[in-house]
Every structure is written in structure tokens, then in C-alpha cells.
Amino acid sequence: MRDKRKEPLRLEGKTVVLEEIAPKYFSYVVAWRNNPELNKYLNQPFVLTEELEKKWYEETYVKDDTQGLLVIVDKKTNTPIGTTGWANMDRERRRCTGERLLLGDSRFRTSAAFLESFFVVGDFLYRSVDTMYCHVAVENKKAMRLDKMLGFQVNQGEIQYPQNLLVCGLVQQELYRTNEMYETIRQQLL
Amino acid sequence: MTQEEFVSKMQDEVLDTDQEIAMETKLEEIEEWDSLAFVSFIAIANTAAGKQVDRTAVQNAVTVGDLYALLQ
């Protein structure tokens, strides 16, 4: 297993850099995840602190190679703008769940960097998986539309992650996107 | 696509807003001009206008008319 502390993941695109979570980013993540506007759809029914983030990082994150948390950094201004990531990485069944997509700095809501981040992480993950799943609160219409624009479709078949269908009292819908669906949308949007 | 068709598409499909918009409307004054609208615009440019627009040019657009110009 890769040592996440010594060899943090770094993915680079044309306008964006995705850097694996590290102590230097804790204050950003804490501020974003505690923002009431952003927090309402997160699986975080408590106030996050830097101490809690550090504890999670050291006791859980660095020991777990099934999940990833990357900070989206706008390359031009070197500004951290949000997060993206995954969990439930299953290399045998070649699937994972997309998680932790968060635009923390709303000034970058229409930035090329934020859009490119979807594809930089997608290109990385589809080397290891054939299908990505994600779970979106039914009432979060914007996220639902965005995920569909990015090629995801509602899973009408057998639900793969039933435990993810109810988060903090919010009913979630399961969506999926195969590698083929991803390539189609990638060609359209990039 | 005419300017009228474009404004209508922006209003109903890209922005999904009740706000009246025109070619001169500044994007920063439209609450719905966000990451979703950004992606929607690029998708529509591709499918409806057959254009592969530059993402940085979209980011730099100031008005609705600037976006229209990218499709010409």
C-alpha cells in the first residue's frame, strides 16, 4: 500500500492540480465542510474541527487504500477551491463510489479548473475501475443535474450500495457511470 | 442559432431561471450561472451548435452575448 503521507497523490491537468489531502489543507476543508450551505447535503452531522480532521487523517485515512480525498487547486492562482474523491475502491470488482465533491470557494463556480477536475480524477479512477457509482440527495436537484451532465445515469437495476441511500435523514438516489459512458461525455465536454 | 433562440436556450436549459436575461446581461448578475450552467453551456455548444468551445474562454466571458459569440 502506498504511504499517503510520504507519497501523496498529485494529479495535474491543464488548469487544475489535484493534491491529496495533507495537513496544509485541513483548515480549508474544515471551513468548507462547516459552511451551512455546503454542509446540508454532506454526511457530516457535526461541526468539524482541525483536531477531528487530523485524527481522521492519521487514524483512518492514511491506513485505508480504498478511499481518496483530493483538494482541487486552481493552477493559475494556486488557490484551493474544493475537494473531490472516492471511496469503496474495489480493485477486484473494478468499481468505486465517487465522493466528497465540494466546491468550497464559490468564486470558482464557473472556472475551467473546476470543470477539468471532474475529468482529471475520472481519468485516474477509470484506470482501476469499470464503473463508478455516486449517491445524490433526491432534493439536491442541482447536483443531480450536474451528475447527469457528467454522464451518470440513475441506477434502475440492483442497488449496489443500499447503505448509502439514506444519509443524515436525506433520501439518496444511486447513479452509475461506466467507463464507456465516461469516454462519451469526456469527448463532448473536454 | 439566432440570438433570440440562444437567449431562450440559455434561460430555459442552461440556467433554468425565471430571471429575464438579454445579450447584455452580465453573467455575474445571474445567480444560476454556476458550475452546472457552465457544464450545460459547454454541452449545448457541442450538441446544438457543433462547437468545441474553449473552457477558459467560457470562464472569461462577461455577458450572455460573449457566450453567444463563442458559438459563432
Image (tube, rainbow, N blue to C red):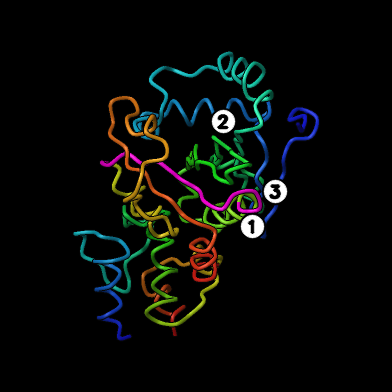
Q: Which residues are magenta?
A: A126-139
* Magenta highlight on residue A127: yes
Q: Residue at x 31, y 52 (%)?
A: B31
Q: Assign the N terminus of chain A to one quadrant of the image.
A: top right
- For the residues labelled 1 and 3, the Cα–Cα distance comes to 11 Å
- A164 lies above or below A50: below
Residue type for callout 2: Tyr
Quarter of the image for residue A56 reads top right
Nearer the observer, A190 or A49: A190
* Percent x, y of residue A183: 54, 65
- Dot 2 crowding, Cα within 10 Å, few <14, some 14–19, many 20+: some
Of pointers 2 and 1, the one earlier in the residue sequence? 1
Q: Residue at x 37, y 60 (%)?
A: B37
Q: Would residue A55 be found to the left or right of residue A166 on screen?
A: right
- For the residues labelled 2 and 1, the Cα–Cα distance comes to 20 Å
Residue type for callout 1: Thr
Q: Residue at x 24, y 73 (%)?
A: B8
